[in-house]
Amino acid sequence: MPLDPFFVERLRVHRRYLLDRARASAKARLIALWPFGRSRSPEPQPPKAAEPFPSRPSTQGPQARARARHRRAALAWDRKELETVGLAGPDIPIEEHRLELDGLAPFRVRIYRPAERGDQPVPGCLALFGGAFRIGGIDYPTTDAGYRHRAADSGVAIVAVDYSLAPERRFPTQIEQAYAALEWLFDNAEGLGIRPDRIGILGTSAGGNLAAAVTLMNRDRAGRPIRLQVLEVPVTDLTGRHVDLAATRALGIPSFLAKREMRSVASTYLPNARDAKRPYASPLLAPSHAGLPPAVVLTAEYDPLRSDGAAYGAALRAAGVEASVVLYLGVTHDTPIFTGVLPAARRWHDDIVAALRRLHDEPQTPQE
């Protein structure tokens, strides 16, 4: 199906962004290699004193400052997106908790409660945002608005995890934080007004990777009764073997630029390229997918990750897990945020809400 006209101008902007990044990177490499015109070597400097906590992520240096600028720009862009193409979220009860668990870096959890439920316990869904592991967060306006709408429309409490970003914290920190949040949710569900027998997990893009990994980790460790996993445009194989470059070529984005971006994401998140083959980094590569929760997977036609989602759904089905995979035609990876202007985004929201409402159903008891 042709690309929805809404995306045409946005695509031109994105292509220009990718080309500008490629040119800047090539220029930096040439300058580093060019032997002429360099200034003389700087005077030697005395060695710096050792930092008291050398394992603590650095917040200094040009790369860290560049990341901070990029994240500020991304946050400003996201705010503009909500104002121009999104829908502001409803005013519903929220609460925050700061978790310091199992020696992990501290992180926040924000609970979005469906207002009409009052004091009655409701189902809950652990939610993990997207952003290529290196940007995003629960304070991003489109993320916050999306969680508000989903909680209000589904009657399910959305328990959003503000996991640490890479490269300041790398794999498996984010998965361990998400798993610790899941354990905390089950252990404290009744006090939080959440039904412990009706808990699911949801993740978008990089968050979809984490959500899938957490279900594997939960199966391998405690076996908590996760009722449902909802994965939106998930990346499930960080080796890149399932990246669908036909999707990017259809958008007029050269394959080398798409590959470069994917490699950049993986290298930012993973301490070592070999880690991409580990099941908790690439859930698709797990030796077995048996015993995982029922899954709803949403993918987009013009998204290089569409095959990741399809392959993961197929792997779940092959292992006897109930799984459905829906491909939205004519749209791109970031479709869910455009609910203010795009009918497909509103339908996407409705499908997520329908999936979350399954958590209201009574748990099935095993038949003898």
Image: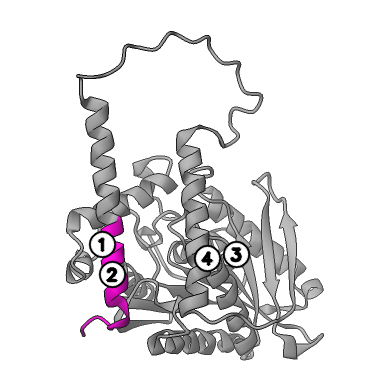
Q: How far apart are marks 2 and 1 (CA)?
A: 6 Å
The verdict on residue 27 being magenta is no
Q: Give me the residue at 49% from left, 10% from top.
A: 45
- Residue 347 vs 175, above or below: the answer is below
Residue 336 is labelled as none
Image quarter (top left, top right, bottom left or bottom right) of the N terminus: bottom left
What amino acid is at disc 3? Ile
Q: Distance between the residues labelled 1 and 4?
A: 24 Å
- Kind of element beneath mark 2: helix
**Mark count:** 4
Q: Are marks 3 and 2 in contact (CB under 8 Å)?
A: no
Q: How far apart are marks 3 and 2 (CA)?
A: 26 Å
Horizontal side of 212 relative to 197 (left or right) equals left
The verdict on residue 13 being magenta is yes
- Residue 256 vs 189, above or below: the answer is above
Per the image, the residue denoted by label 4 is 129
Packing grade of label 2 (10 A; few <14, some 14-19, many >=20) is some
What amino acid is at disc 2? Leu
- Kind of element beneath mark 1: helix
Q: Give me the residue at 60% from left, 18% from top.
A: 50
Q: In which quarter of the image is residue 259?
A: bottom left
* Front position among marks 4 and 3: 3
Residue 138 is labelled as 3
Q: Distance between the residues labelled 4 and 2?
A: 23 Å
Query: In the rendered structure, which disc, 3 or 1, sits on the residue that comes first in sequence?
Result: 1
Per the image, the residue denoted by label 1 is 15
Horizontal side of 302 relative to 167 (left or right) equals left
Q: Do the residues labelled 2 and 1 touch (CB within 8 Å)?
A: yes
Q: Do the residues labelled 4 and 3 touch (CB within 8 Å)?
A: yes
Q: Residue 277: image x %, image y %? A: 35, 50
